[in-house]
Amino acid sequence: MFFYYQIRNHPHKTVAVPEITCPLCHTAGHMEMNFMQKYAWVFGPIAPSGKFAMAFCDHCKNHVPAVRWTDEMDTVFQLHKRELKTPRRLYRGLIVFPLAMVAIVGAIILVTKVKGNKQQGNQALVKEAIAHPRKGDIFQINQSDGTNTNYTYFKVASTRGDSIYMYPSTVHLTDMKDMKQWDEIPVADDAYEKTPIAFSIKQAQTSDMFMYNTQPTQYGIVWSLYRDGQLYKKY
Ligand SMILES: [Zn+2]
């Protein structure tokens, strides 16, 4: 996150100081001073700082740089500066800035919560799909034998009693770098083996994974459900 800010000048006043002789053209009666003040601007004026003046001679049409100021000019500047009050509006950002912060933080919390709710909804849906699978449902599976892990898919073929028959995918991703590719669910039949494997629905419901009847134990953790063209991710 970054904040855009600017340094701006607030003009206080312009005063004629005819008693001053211009240090550039040595003519009196044509000098004026513009009093200003710097402040930062973030969502509004904030942090007013130094007051300063620009001296201008209407005779030679020059701005007199501060290094050329005479003692007389310094004295006049100090006298006027003392009377300048920092306007209250230059502190307005002190109110606006925290309010903007609260709004930003609130928006982040809301987005996080909405995302969390969506995940909870998806978790319920995946749970329901394991209990009552539909032909064509595809589960995104994190497959493991305890040592090796790969990322693959199971496509529901049919169910009978406690048994769910699924075609394991021939696609096996092994690198976490391919996670984005993992979310591109293959739907075509040729991305799946011809023979379905049977799993216990009850076992899947209690452990949240499909257990193979093999030794050593192999299992597939259910990561998400792909149904009717939509991917419902649990995490
Ligand atoms: Zn001058």
Image (cartoon, rainbow, N blue to C red):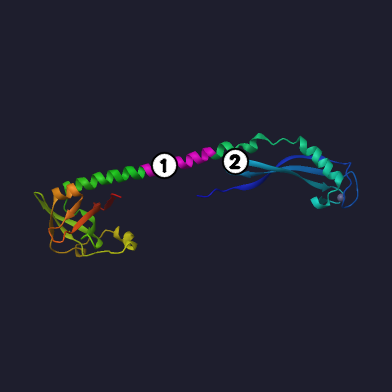
Q: What residue type is labelled 2?
A: Gly
Of callouts 2 and 1, the N-terminal one = 2
In the image, what residue occupies the spot 62% across and 41% down? 45
Quarter of the rendering containing residue 149? bottom left
Please say if 119 is above or below 168: above
What residue does disc 2 label?
A: 44
SS assignment for the magenta stretch, majority? helix
What residue does disc 1 label?
A: 109
Q: Where is residue 2 in the image (x, y as percent from the top left)?
A: 53, 50
Instruction: Examine the rendering and report whether any part of residue 65 can be seen.
Output: no
Q: Which residue is more in the foreground, 26 or 52?
A: 52
Q: Where is residue 20 in the image (x, y as percent from the top left)?
A: 88, 44
Label 1 element class: helix
In the image, what residue occupies the spot 10% across and 49% down? 162
The label number, if any, that marks residue 74 in the structure image: none
Q: Position of residue 235 (x, y in %)?
A: 30, 50
Badge 1 crowding class, 10 Å Cα cut-off, few under 14, some 14 to 19, many 20 or more, is few
- Of the two numbered discs 2 and 1 in the rendering, the one whose residue sits closer to the viewer: 1
Label 2 element class: loop
Q: In this view, does 216 lie to the left or right of 2?
A: left
Q: Distance between the residues labelled 2 and 1?
A: 24 Å
